[in-house]
Amino acid sequence: MWGGTPLVETRVRVSEIIWGTADIILLSEDGKTVHIVDLKYGQGHIVSADLNYQALCYAIGAINHLEPAEQAKIEAVHVHIFQPRAGGEPWREWETTMAGVESAREKLLYAETMIRAGSVTLKTGSWCKFCDASAICPARAAEAREVARDVFGDNTPPPVETLSVDQISRIIELTPRVEEWLKAVHDLGVRKLERGEALPGYKLVNKIGNRKWTDEKAVSQTMQLYGVDPFTKPKLVTVAEAERRTAKAGVKLNLTSMVERPVTGQALVPMSDKRPANDAIAVFPKN
């Protein structure tokens, strides 16, 4: 079954409630390896192929569609993540044995059993960014209240200069998740109004875009008639656009000696970031 022939945009199921649509599924011609290829087009979060449960769900669902004799032949699952816009290496791979796949299946089905039994513990993390229930999640709301309580107590926000270094670190750590939760609440409010529900104190109005010409040719002719130049001056294309154009033209042109990546400022990042820390004295010398 589909040995050597890729299945594109195929919906597969692990169970009744665990399912997904895989970008590409490929069973090797010898029937021993299932390949899962997943395109990630986002920029903000680099997706690892290692122990990627989304890809493993696709693999398990694909294997479920095979006949028992075909399932018995499979020895490995190979995960391919292609993420061209996130920076770094765009193509990431990971392989596991069928023992690893079965272990993942057991964990997924156990989690489903716990959810159905109502025995769950909500846990916040970076994954909340992609959760449709983020706006109504008690754990996310509690996290936001925790930040507010730690910083504000029962009073108005204190001057930032009075915060301890531990408070500053904790606030910085949780700020992205709180912002994501607030945005999710905002989006939920918009959806309720779009469905015709009432949201006390708020309404929907049209967004107005920037002004634009309705007839560019007429504008050009009119401005030139009065001696006004209607066109902007030519501007050099960006580095990325230059690379795209030379590649499209089939020209082998190396412009790297004319390219620089200037430092535009300082970025506050977790200690887990692989870049070396800046020397504060070198960056901000004392007077």
Image: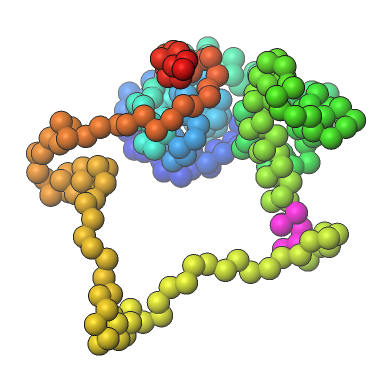
- On the rendered structure, is 58 left or right of 2? right
Quadrant where the image shows the N terminus: top left
Q: Quadrant of residue 87?
A: top left
Residue 58: x, y in percent? 52, 32
Q: Nearer the viewer, residue 284 or 54?
A: 284
Task: Determine whether 161 is above or below 192 in the image.
Answer: above
Q: Is residue 180 magenta?
A: no
Residue 164: x, y in percent? 72, 17
- On the rendered structure, is 45 left or right of 196? left
Q: Residue at x 47, y 15 (%)?
A: 286
The figure's colour scheme reads: rainbow
Q: Nearer the viewer, residue 57 or 135?
A: 135
The answer to whether residue 111 is seen in the rendering is no
Q: Nearer the viewer, residue 108 or 158?
A: 158
Task: Determine whether 250 is above or below 64 in the image.
Answer: below
Q: Quadrant of residue 259?
A: top left
Q: Residue at x 63, y 32 (%)?
A: 176
Q: Residue at x 33, y 78 (%)?
A: 216
- On the rendered structure, is 276 left or right of 142? left
Q: Nearer the viewer, residue 167 or 3?
A: 167
The magenta segment is: 189-195
Residue 180: x, y in percent? 66, 38
Q: Residue at x 30, y 31 (%)?
A: 261
Q: Quadrant of residue 33?
A: top left
Q: Is residue 190 magenta?
A: yes
